Image: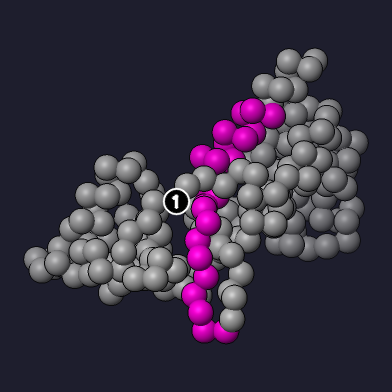
């Protein structure tokens, strides 16, 4: 909110100027500024600076709504595959489900990891036998995966998406006991957030 107020007061204003106003370094603000631009709260022009975004100009309501909303209110249904599935069938699933990430689960339906098109491309290029390899051999394993919990805020989800530069993040129920993998209840993707932003913008326009 403080960044929004500063931009509203001084726009156009550069990242260096904002950092000076707040008494922090420019890199410290980078992820916050990227997040606000992603949300449409700010716009940026090279060699000019930051100014209020057209979509949410002069209004704090969208940001306040994001602050109030929980991940469980916006999460989508993930595309789950068993860890025994072959790389070949995983590629087919990606196309059939029009997904950019697959959630891998073990025989107990608990979270084992994720697999992306990049993972599949790496293993298949120049490897004639790759199609029969199980996805468990090429996935990014939990807990080396960024996750969310249902009660985290949507703002935190957007921040993680921005900072980690990923397309989606699994939503998990916290571990019941040490060593027991969690259960995946959903995921938050960039498309979820874009749809949410569109709904809020439409509601604001109708309210105006």
Extreme left residue here? 128
Give the quadrant of residue 105.
bottom left
Assess whether residue 164 is covered by the magenta stretch: no
Q: Which residues are magenta?
A: 178-200
Task: Using a 10 Å C-alpha cutoff, classify the residue at mark 1 as few (fewer than 14 neighbours), some (14 to 19) or many (20 or more).
Answer: many
Assess whether residue 185 is covered by the magenta stretch: yes
Reply above or below: 82 against 13: below
Give the quadrant of residue 58.
top right
Image quadrant occupied by the N terminus? top right
Q: Which residue is mark 1?
A: 78
Reply above or below: 52 against 27: above
Q: Secondary structure at mark 1?
A: loop
Q: Report the residue at 50% width, 65% height from top.
A: 183
How many labels were placed on the picture? 1
Q: Report the residue at 73% width, 36% height from top.
A: 41
Q: Is residue 123 visible?
A: no
| Image spot of residue 170 (x, y percent) | 51, 58
Q: Report the residue at 52% width, 70% height from top.
A: 182
Q: Is residue 42 visible?
A: yes
Reply above or below: 114 against 56: below
Image quadrant occupied by the C terminus? top right
Drawn side of residue 173 relative to residue 50, left or right: left
| Image spot of residue 203 (x, y percent) | 71, 22
| Image spot of residue 163 (x, y percent) | 60, 58
């Amino acid at each position: 909110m403080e960044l929004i107020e500063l931009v509203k007061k001084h726009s156009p204003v550069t990242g260096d100027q904002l950092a000076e106003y707040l008494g922090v370094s420019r890199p410290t603000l980078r992820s916050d500024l990227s997040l606000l631009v992603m949300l449409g709260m700010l716009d940026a022009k090279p060699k000019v600076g930051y100014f209020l975004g057209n979509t949410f100009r002069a209004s704090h309501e969208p940001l306040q709504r994001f602050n109030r909303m929980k991940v469980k209110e916006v999460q989508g249904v993930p595309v789950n595959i068993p860890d025994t599935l072959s790389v070949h069938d995983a590629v087919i699933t990606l196309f059939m489900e029009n997904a950019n990430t697959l959630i891998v689960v073990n025989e107990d339906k608990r979270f084992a990891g994720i697999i992306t098109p990049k993972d599949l491309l790496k293993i298949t290029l120049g490897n004639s036998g790759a199609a029969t390899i199980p996805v468990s051999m090429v996935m990014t394993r939990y807990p080396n995966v960024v996750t969310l919990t249902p009660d985290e805020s949507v703002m935190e989800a957007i921040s993680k998406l921005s900072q980690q530069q990923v397309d989606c993040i699994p939503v998990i129920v916290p571990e019941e006991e040490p060593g027991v993998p969690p259960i995946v209840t959903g995921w938050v993707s960039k498309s979820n957030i874009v749809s949410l932003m569109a709904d809020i913008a439409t509601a604001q326009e109708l309210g105006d």
